[in-house]
Amino acid sequence: MLKLRHPFFNPLWRRVAVVVFTAAWGMVELFWGAELFWAIVFFGLSGVCAWVFLYDWQDVPEDQD
């Protein structure tokens, strides 16, 4: 479903941007929209992205799609 191991994410700034964006959107949903369900979804997604992108990342060769 989500292909997180893709050459597009090799640069560190892109991986950090995805983690920050998903966490920030969770904050927006929680505090501004008062939507607990969507806040939990985006915080969960942020946690998965943080694990894959920042903790467990290994660069993917450019020829792999």
Image: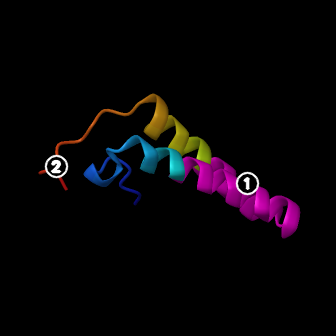
Q: Earlier in the sequence, mark 1 or mark 2?
A: 1
Q: Is 4 placed above or below 29 here?
A: above
Q: Position of residue 2 (x, y in %)?
A: 41, 57
Residue drawn at the location 17% of the way across and 43% of the way down: 61
Magenta segment: does it hold 24? yes
Camera-nearest label, 1 or 2: 2
For image coordinates 41% across by 41% down, the residue present is 12
Which numbered dot is residue 53?
none
The secondary element bearing badge 1 is classed as helix
- Residue at the far bottom in the pictured view: 33
Answer whether residue 30 is visible to the viewer in this image: yes
Q: Residue 39: x and y, percent? A: 75, 58
Tell me the element at label 2: loop
Check disc 1 and give the amino acid type.
Ile
Q: Which mark is residue 62?
A: 2
Assign the N terminus to one quadrant of the image.
bottom left
Q: Nearer the viewer, residue 45 or 20?
A: 20
- 14 or 65, nearer to the observer: 14
Please identify the residue farthest to the top as the structure is shown.
Answer: 55
Q: Main secondary structure of the magenta part?
A: helix
